[in-house]
Amino acid sequence: MFDRQQKSVGKQAGKAGFTLREVANPIAGGLFRVFSKVPAFVRRLGGVSGLVLLLVILAAVGGFIFAGHGFFFRPCTIRDRVGVGALDETIYIFGGTRPDVGVLRDVLAFDVRRRRVSPVGELPWPAHCAMIAAADGALYVMDGRSGSTAIPEIVRFDPTNRSIEPVGRMPESRSFGAVTSDGETIYYVGGWDGAAVRDEVLAFSPGAWEARIVARLPVPVRNCAAVCSSGRLYVLGGETGEGDLLSLLVEVDIESGRVLRTFELPTPISRTTIVEFADYLYVFGGWNREALGDIARISIGEGPMVHEIVGQLPAPSSECTALIANQRIVVVGGESVYDGRELRISEFDPVELAFRVLRFRGSI
């Protein structure tokens, strides 16, 4: 009885121009039509030849599906406390932590234009909370931590050949500082040396790695944020050796090492992230007894510095990183997206003051 009903439904579907399988699932129906022709073709060839051909066809289909995995699927990229750097249109993620894995050592490349993510190498050791600076067309990994131990080595990542190798060491144990660059020289600001919080701004020239002191801040500081712009170094917030939060923005002339201006923020802040864009500093999140969600903008042109709150992060965060990629402000980290599977990477529009989440396909 059931067979007759099934045939009846099949005939009705056939009159409409499609098979029963197509009614249930268009994709399965298409595959059924293709593979339904294979046995007859195999029988024409006969015996072993037909079997070999069938295996070749199956292997080709399997290869197509495997090759297309990175195009069709979105991988799990979730991780915390990552190191973040950018060159041109690509964002690079270094290490980090995942609850199910622990401390990571892989390096991922997120192509913003093509919306593709791919693995491009591994750090010499697992690391989290690393600071990344771009100079001479490469990215330099500094101030990372393995567990609770600071990593003194400086690692160079060359995206052209995907080489990753140690190239130097910090002059002494430093951690919890801020790292930035002007494209040629890398600056390490403040930090903790294991005994005290420091006030120096150290400069490193790629290739030499002999640190030199180019400036001193008004106060020793750790967990601050720093950025270079037009020959100036801006250092914002942070903490003293006693753990007190600072509400100070310092502008330093890099060539002379002189402090040009200081500005008092409305409230103290640490563990924040800043970028410079069109004569403004944009400040994202931070920490003041709890994670903060404010987006602040500070004018740094020739006139007086002015601070204003211009928006909110999707969720409060003291672990996100802001950077410039292809002349756009991109914020990495913070609250995860899409069921907690993907690292949040968002583009921030400084005109509309709005975020747009970027999603990536690939295989990692």
Image: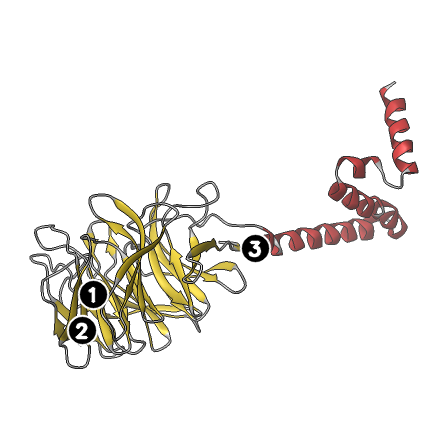
Q: How crowded is mark 3: few (under 14 residues within 10 Å), some or many (20 or more)?
A: some
Which residue is pictured at 79% across the width and 41% down the height?
29
| Disc sitting over residue 53 in the figure | none
Asked which secondary structure carries label 2, the reply is strand
| Disc sitting over residue 252 in the figure | 2
Q: Observer-nearest residue: 311 or 269? A: 311
Disc 2 vs disc 1: Cβ atoms closer than 8 Å? Answer: yes
Q: Where is residue 167 in the image (x, y as percent from the top left)?
A: 27, 72
Q: Position of residue 313 (x, y in %)?
A: 36, 50
Disc 3 residue type (three-letter): Gly
Distance from Cα at disc 1 to Cα at disc 3: 41 Å
| Disc sitting over residue 70 in the figure | 3
Q: Residues within 10 Å of mark 1 (few under 14, many from 20)?
A: many
Q: Is residue 174 above or below residue 18?
A: below
Distance from Cα at disc 2 to Cα at disc 3: 46 Å
Which residue is pictured at 47% across the width and 47% down the height?
76
Q: Where is residue 228 in the image (x, y as percent from the top left)?
A: 27, 72
